[in-house]
Image: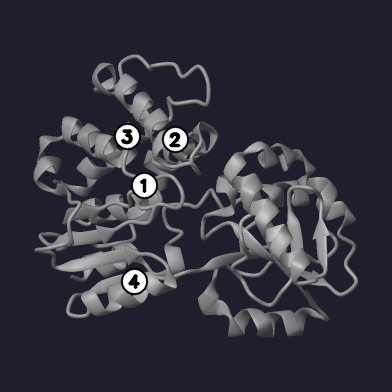
Amino acid sequence: MTIDDHKAHLISLGKFLGQFQVTDSVKAKNLPGNDRFFDRFNEKIDSSIHYNGWFNRENIIYSLQQWSKALTQHNLKLWLDEYDLSKSGGKTIGIVMAGNIPLVGFHDFISVLVAGHKVLIKQSSSDQQLLPVIAEYLIFLDARYEERIQFTKDNLQGFDAVIATGSNNTARYFEYYFKDKPSIIRKNRNSIAVITGNESREDLENLSEDIFRYYGLGCRNVSKLYVPEDYDFDSFFKAMYKWNPIINQDKYANNYDYNKAVYLMSEFKLLDNGFLILKEDKSFGSPIASVFYETYRDESELEEILEENAEKIQCIVSNRSSKNEVKFGQTQKPQLWDYADNIDTIEFLSKL
């Protein structure tokens, strides 16, 4: 299968995923396999919600729409044309997927395929409804995928390399279990936002998307703010207000109530707007319904802090002109070439 074959199939897949909406999805005409897969995939979206209380249709559709926008001829060309994949392939790559947000392991899945390898997938029990149907859709488009895609519920066996994503605790297990194989092992990372005090209302409203999308469960969600000393949070809280309906989600509300109670009993100083808690803290991973913040005196002090903690940070969100920083509102819209932990997955796969 050539790289152009993969591109063509992924473009078709992107169009397929783009049909689905929060309400009133409309089945496109003349899309390959649509009569067979449209209703089934729509049902699997609803099934995902029942299997995972943190999934809702809005967030699942958001994920599907972002993948649909990513899987275009233009983006696939930009992503893949810089690699020489002519000699890549023939290996079996195990993928251990997380389940914190919908289709969180999808990028690894398509990366293995376009690199010419076989993929052996162990899904998280929290997110196992959508990807098998996507795999079947690809097999419908090209039967050669059938021998290249395999799912397992058991421990991985018979693989040549592995990509595994989990917590810091599970990463230690992965590092031991996969010590004899080439691997990419991903640990906990969090994303931060740098506030200068010069942000517009639109900037801060866009930041709310980075904080609240997927209830803050993703590694690209902003869980910590760096703000100037004596920063006035009034504008920040006003910009967050459009997300106030999130408190009506039971699991989110339970976390908000619990974490607020714990903080109050510990007599921590808090800022609170009724659905989001701000706590001054040097840590990066804030609990659900809360965001940590830390103040900085000047740019040089901030750069020193960020450099020292680079291994803990997935994304830096700001309006500064610094290289590799993400604009407000863009953390959950990664490009195909925005690799997790800044590890080039395609380069890793092409050298096996």
Q: Which mark is residue 11?
A: none
Q: Closer to us: mark 3 or mark 4?
A: 4
What's the amino acid at mark 1? Leu
Q: Position of residue 239 (x, y in %)?
A: 80, 47
Q: Which mark is residue 185?
A: 4
Q: Can residue 315 be seen in this view?
A: no
Alpha-carbon span between mark 4 and mark 2: 28 Å
Residue at (82, 51) in percent of width and height: 237
- Counting residues from the N terminus, which is met first, the one under dot 4 or under dot 2? 2
Q: In this view, does 181 lie above or below 164?
A: below
Judge whether 300 appears above or below 122 on screen: below
In three-dimensional space, the C-alpha distance between marks 1 and 2, rounded to whole angstroms, equals 30 Å
Q: Earlier in the sequence, mark 1 or mark 4?
A: 1
Checking the image for residue 49, the label placed there is: 2
* Mark 3 to mark 1 CA distance (whole Å): 12 Å
Q: Nearer the viewer, residue 349 or 41?
A: 41
Number of the label disc, if any, that sits on residue 76: 1
Q: Mark 3 points at which residue?
A: 13
